[in-house]
Image (tube, rainbow, N blue to C red):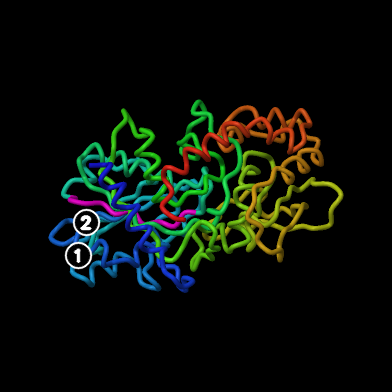
Amino acid sequence: MQRFLFLSLIIISGCSNQSQEAPTTISPGAYQTEQYLSLLRNKSIGLTVNHSSLINETHLTDSLLSLGINVTKVYTPEHGFTGTVSDGVSIAYDSADSPYELISLYGKNKKPTKEQLNGIDLMIFDIQDVGARFYTYISTMHYVMEACAKNNIPLIILDRPNPNGSYVDGPVLDTAFSSFVGMHPIPIVHGLTVGELALMINGEGWLENGLKADLTVIPVGNWDHTIPYSLPIKPSPNLPDDLSISLYPSLCLFEGTIMSVGRGTDHAFQQIGHPQYPDTTYSFTPRSREGAKWPPYEDQKCYGISWKGEKPQYKFSLQPLIQAYKKMNEVDFFNDYFKRLAGNDVLQKQVEMGMTESEIRATWQESLNQFKQKRTKYLLYN
């Protein structure tokens, strides 16, 4: 069955990108209602969604309910249904006044329990990703796939473009360092949409005990990995725009250091700083706010480096990390979280040894090339 579904998806994807004229409007999977509505009729539907699950300006839940689809349960990832809860904060819901049951997958449990799936005939996953291994929405997708596979519930992925999907870079995760911020042996920038990654998870046997989800992917229309995609809505509280999204794969590594990445400001992931950062006049002061409660160095002036106002450059770089480490000259620059973000215990040692970026890159190139080759099996877009 899995082989049949995969072949079907390739055909659908090819049709959506074979126009004789240049594509004009990118159409995410959720927009392709003609491809999946018939699969939802007369079924109890669960949705794994958040604020980014839109069809134009209407939320997927509202669209499906208006079309007479029986949406009974809604499951949400980190940052919650509204996408405004701070990173790392557990979420719980009161569904008393909701037309469906709201279930948090970032609270008591991150994987849907059998009880939480009771009564569901089919699950839909529709969440905007940004293409970095440590972005936790893909970890939630993994757990949803696993739970659906265990409980014989078919899963439909409504695919969306990856704004960092034009390249592949960074060290491939060592599975000894698997965590919720890195569950799969993929590089920091994996170059896959959530639909393509779901196919890889299934195809490579990465679910528990080699389980296979009964998986269907509804592809994006009029898009491929070479086409830029500007998100219509910020995907999480601290990625406010295209610049932050493009810098995120490089700057998120600083979350495993003593540096601030600007949480608690209007320009998170566009700047780095520390109260004792030397030789600079640039500064910012983090404040507690919605989506960034108790940010590092709250109410303290941080000095550092800014990329504000620059044009987004979709590439992964170690230069900010290497330079900041040299500037701070701090024995305790890294914390234990860094190894989970890096996906290994090697990168920290390489930076501390004073290796150049090109020297560090050479050490991960073979495994990166192997991943790139594996990736081609699961690509849905030209």
Q: Position of residue 44 (x, y in %)?
A: 17, 56
Three-letter amino acid code of the residue under disc 2: Ile
Q: Residues within 10 Å of mark 2 (few under 14, many from 20)?
A: many
Mark 2, residue position:
45
Q: Is residue 109 left or right of residue 281?
A: left
- Where residue 151 sits, quadrant-wise, is top left
Kindly identify the residue that appears in the image at 76 percent across and 48 percent down: 275
Mark carried by residue 69:
1
The verdict on residue 297 being magenta is no
Instruction: Relative to 63, say whether 40 is above or below.
Output: above
The answer to whether residue 49 shows anywhere in this view is: no
Kindly identify the residue that appears in the image at 40 percent across and 56 percent down: 127
- Where residue 100 sits, quadrant-wise, is bottom left
The verdict on residue 125 being magenta is yes
What's drawn in magenta, residue-wise?
120-129
Three-letter amino acid code of the residue under disc 1: Ile
Q: Tell me the quarter of the image containing the N terminus.
A: top left
Q: Position of residue 28 (x, y in %)?
A: 40, 64
Between 313 and 22, the one lying in front of the other is 22
- In space, the residues marked 1 and 2 are separated at their CA atoms by 8 Å
